[in-house]
Amino acid sequence: MDVTIEMADDVAVLIPSGNFVASETDSFNAQIAKLVENNIRYMLLDMSRIKFMDSSGLDAIMSVNKQVTNGGGIFACAALHDNVQKVFRVTWADQKIPIVATRSDGLQMIQGLRADKAQ
Amino acid sequence: MEERILTMELEAHFRNVDIARAALQGISAECFGKDTERAADITMAVNEAMNNAVEHSGSTTVKLEVAWNEKGLRVLVINDGPPFDPVAAAAELNQEDMLERDEGGYGLYLIRELVDRFEYEYNGSRNIWKLYKMA
């Protein structure tokens, strides 16, 4: 799985492409592990290039969320296609991970939460 | 439309699930036409059933039998692992379980929620998962 990583200040914007499924999650997890090792604490997953995601993909996302938030960071997902959003909704994962409409919304939300934490 | 049938037998490997899913996307698009949500639902549910067979059944192969007509689509996902009743397991899951869990276990819940009917049979030393989606 190709994951483009762009930095927006100290927020890593992850942009995977293709199908987020069982055959691809090892590759995704390996790339995330490097970011965690490098103490990247703020991550935004831009899912605009993901057309299909199964429960293995969701597991991988839940794992990233756990790693980031356990380290005191913030994680969010943005730009979900309808069928990907449905996986989050049906499994109630949308109650555990912040989901926003666009990448810029996500960056704004993360900066807002950081500001709240700092106070 | 007369009932049409497609049968596939796959080596139990996630890459083969990808190929079977592509075939099923084509079939479900033909069966459900513009109702892309129903087509996506059954594709997702069958994908989860195949994933489960590859990851948990211990079976070396997974067989897929797809039958469809204008009334809907029926998919059998068959493995020859030890008996496991996914319908009973899925029935025990509820919203609270889903909200509490961090990782794992979403597949059966997705199947239960996305198909119109979910049945199981153990017959001839084979686990037969039966997934139905009506048009």
Image (spheres, coloured by chain):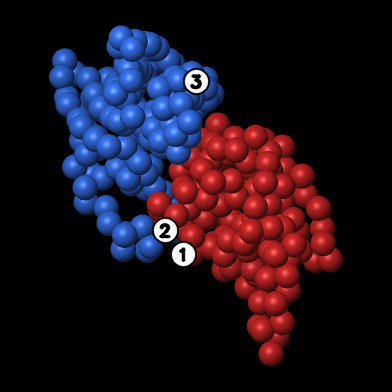
Chain colours: A red, B blue
**Residue B85 relative to residue A110: left or right:** left
The one of B41 and A60 positioned closer to us in this rendering: B41
Tag 3 and tag 1 share a subunit: no
Q: Position of residue A37 (x, y in %)?
A: 71, 57
**Residue A47 relative to residue A39: left or right:** left
Q: Is residue A118 above or below residue A15?
A: below
* Contact check, label 2 and label 1, Cβ < 8 Å: yes
For numbered disc 2, what is the local secondary structure?
Answer: loop
Q: Which residue is drawn at 58% across and 61% down?
A: A99
* Chain hosting mark 2: A
Q: Is residue B92 above or below residue B60?
A: below
Q: Mark 2 points at which residue?
A: A92
Q: Where is residue A10 in the image (x, y as percent from the top left)?
A: 80, 66
Q: Residue at x 31, y 60 (%)?
A: B95
Q: Residue B103 carries which label?
A: none
Tag 2 and tag 3 share a subunit: no
Residue neighbourhood size for the residue with mark 2, other residues' Cα within 10 Å, grouped as few (<14), some (14–19), many (≥20): some
For numbered disc 3, what is the local secondary structure?
Answer: helix
Give the distance between the C-alpha atoms of the residues marked 2 and 3, in whole angstroms. Answer: 28 Å
The one of B72 and A88 positioned closer to us in this rendering: B72
The amino acid marked with disc number 1 is Gln
Q: Where is residue B83 in the image (x, y as percent from the top left)?
A: 20, 29
**Residue A26 relative to residue A39: left or right:** left
The amino acid marked with disc number 2 is Trp
* Chain hosting mark 1: A
Q: Name the residue under label 1.
A: A95
Q: Name the residue under label 3.
A: B26
* Chain hosting mark 3: B
Q: In which quarter of the image is the N terminus of chain A?
A: top right
**Residue B92 relative to residue B39: left or right:** left
